[in-house]
Image (cartoon, rainbow, N blue to C red):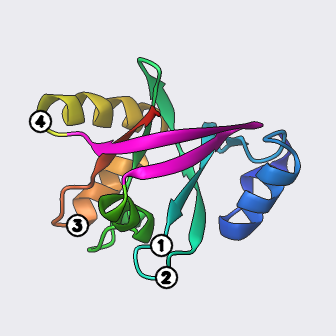
Amino acid sequence: MTVADDQLFGAEHVRAHRESSGERGYHWHGTTILLLTTRGRTSGELRTNPLIYRTDDGRSVIVASRGGAPENPSWFENLRADAEATIQVRAETIPVRADTATGEERARLWSLMTEVWPAYDDYQARTEREIPVVVLTRR
């Protein structure tokens, strides 16, 4: 990882990750990043977002924080409309099904995610919505 990799954001992050098969952009600010591709619920177009993730029992876990904004991120709403998506982890593209964690599982996974990105707790404090924790299981 180079210092420049920590400056990657949005579409530039996606491009660098894809072009390098994850050699650039996989490691970011001390975390790991996957690329989530969903189908737009209105447009039908494919949308890709770089997201912090961790694994849990062979599944990938992501957080729909949107920095603590009052609304869920578009990619989460896309998954609510169509739970089938793909992720890219380094060079591997994986078809997945998304489920939103609830109850004790959500609490456990939230804790797992805040270990690598403590700012999630700050984001939760900024919003009245319960920030969703999403589990991605290989199809």
Answer few, some or many: residues within 10 Å of disc 1's Cα (few below 14, many 20 plus, some between 14 and 19): some
Q: Position of residue 93 (x, y in %)?
A: 67, 40
Which residues make up the magenta segment?
A: 83-101
Contact, mark 1 vs mark 2 (Cβ under 8 Å): yes
Q: Which residue is mark 2?
A: 43
- Spatial distance from mark 1 to mark 4, Cα to Cα? 28 Å
- Judge whether residue 4 can be spotted in this image: no
Contact, mark 1 vs mark 4 (Cβ under 8 Å): no
* Nearest to viewer (mark 1 / mark 4): 1
Residue located at (70% from left, 69% from top): 11
Q: Which residue is mark 4?
A: 103
**Mark found first going from the N terminus, 1 or 3:** 1
Answer few, some or many: residues within 10 Å of disc 3's Cα (few below 14, many 20 plus, some between 14 and 19): some
Q: Could you say which quadrant of the image residue 21 lies in? A: top right
* Nearest to viewer (mark 1 / mark 3): 1
**Mark found first going from the N terminus, 3 or 2:** 2
Name the quadrant of the N terminus: top right
Instruction: Kindly report the secondary structure that dominates the magenta region of the rendered protein.
Output: strand
Residue located at (56% from left, 48% from top): 86
Residue located at (82% from left, 49% from top): 3
- Spatial distance from mark 3 to mark 4, Cα to Cα? 19 Å
Q: Position of residue 87 (x, y in %)?
A: 58, 45
Q: Position of residue 117 (x, y in %)?
A: 47, 42
**Mark found first going from the N terminus, 3 or 4:** 4
Q: Is residue 3 above or below residue 11?
A: above
Kind of residue sitting beneath label 3:
Thr
